[in-house]
Structures are given as structure tokens and as C-alpha cells.
């Protein structure tokens, strides 16, 4: 069937594949926020960032069905596909995980999917501690 060198090569290949799958599952289990840095004015375009605060405004774009949120004075762009899957209201405390983008010379955070927005407490439920995420 296989000679010893072929068996060793096959075992090494299976070991590498197993390690890659294991690392992938570990990173997926940690979630997108694990590698995100807190948003600041020093954040660069393309950085993955997190931002926590109160939603100041909620508006739909005139075209495309996208959602624009303002959290702590920062614009959060939510593409239409993601906006259809979430419900966020003004006054809610949220945690945002997204990518820094520059739009018309101003930094904003673009959310990639519904997992990028988490409502920590709503205006109707002020008893929740927004620090527990």
C-alpha cells in the first residue's frame, strides 16, 4: 500500500490540516471583537475597532436602504443586508465592532454583519450595566 515515507508524509499533512482547522475554530469561537482595538481618533482606515456608547441618532440613507447610527459622536454605517437583521433605537447602549472607513474626509465605522452590533441596554431597561459584555 504505502511505503513508510508516504505514510509519514500523509500523517504530517493530516496533522497540519488538523492544526489549521483547530486554529480556525478557536478564532471563530473568540469572535470578531477579540482582535478589535478601541475606536479613537488615531485609528487608521482598515483597522478593526470596537466602540461602546449610547445611540444618539438613527437614520436611513436616501438610497440603498442603509442605516446610519451616531454613537458617541461617531458615525456607524450599517449596510442594508445587516440593517434588515437588526433593531436599534435611539437611546440604547450598544457595542459596535467594525472597520474604520473614511467617507467624505471623516472617519466612520462600517459594520460587517449583525454580530457587529450588540444592544447592551435599551432606554426602556436602564438597569442593565453596559459594561458587561
Image: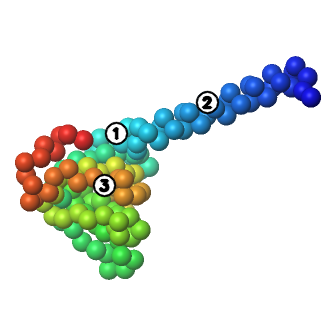
- Determine the residue positioned at 10% across, 59% down: 123
Who is closer to the viewer here, 111 or 72? 111
Q: Please provide percent x and percent y for residue 47.
A: 41, 45
| Residue 27 coordinates in the image, percent (x, y) | 48, 37
Circle 3/circle 2 CB separation < 8 Å: no
- Mark 1–mark 3 Cα distance, whole angstroms, equals 15 Å
Q: What separation in Å lies between label 3 and label 2 (alpha carbons)? A: 31 Å
Residue found at x 40% / y 51%:
99
SS for callout 3: strand
Quarter of the image where one finds residue 106:
bottom left
| Helix, strand or loop under label 1 | strand
First reached walking from the N terminus: tag 3 or tag 2? 2
Crowd class of label 2 (few under 14; some 14 to 19; many from 20; radius 10 Å) = few
Q: Position of residue 8 (x, y in %)?
A: 80, 22
Quadrant of the snapshot with the N terminus: top right
Earlier along the polypeptide chain: callout 1 or callout 3?
1
Quadrant of res 132 = top left
Give the residue displayed 35% in from the left and 53% down from the top: 116
Which residue corresponds to mark 3? 117
The answer to whether 50 appears left or right of 121 in the picture is right
Mark 3 or 2, closer to the camera: 2
Amino acid at each position: 500500500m504505502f511505503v513508510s515515507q508516504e505514510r509519514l508524509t500523509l500523517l504530517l499533512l493530516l496533522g497540519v490540516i488538523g492544526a489549521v482547522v483547530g486554529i480556525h475554530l478557536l478564532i471563530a469561537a473568540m469572535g470578531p471583537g477579540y482582535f478589535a482595538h478601541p475606536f479613537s481618533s488615531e485609528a487608521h482606515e482598515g483597522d478593526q475597532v470596537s466602540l461602546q456608547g449610547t445611540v444618539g441618532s438613527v437614520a436611513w440613507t436616501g438610497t440603498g436602504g442603509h442605516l446610519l447610527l451616531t454613537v458617541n459622536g461617531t458615525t456607524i454605517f450599517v449596510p442594508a443586508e445587516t440593517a434588515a437583521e437588526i433593531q436599534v433605537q435611539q437611546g440604547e447602549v450598544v457595542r459596535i465592532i467594525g472597520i474604520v472607513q473614511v467617507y467624505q474626509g471623516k472617519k466612520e465605522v462600517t459594520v460587517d454583519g449583525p454580530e457587529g452590533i450588540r444592544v447592551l441596554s435599551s432606554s426602556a431597561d436602564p438597569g442593565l450595566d453596559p459594561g458587561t459584555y
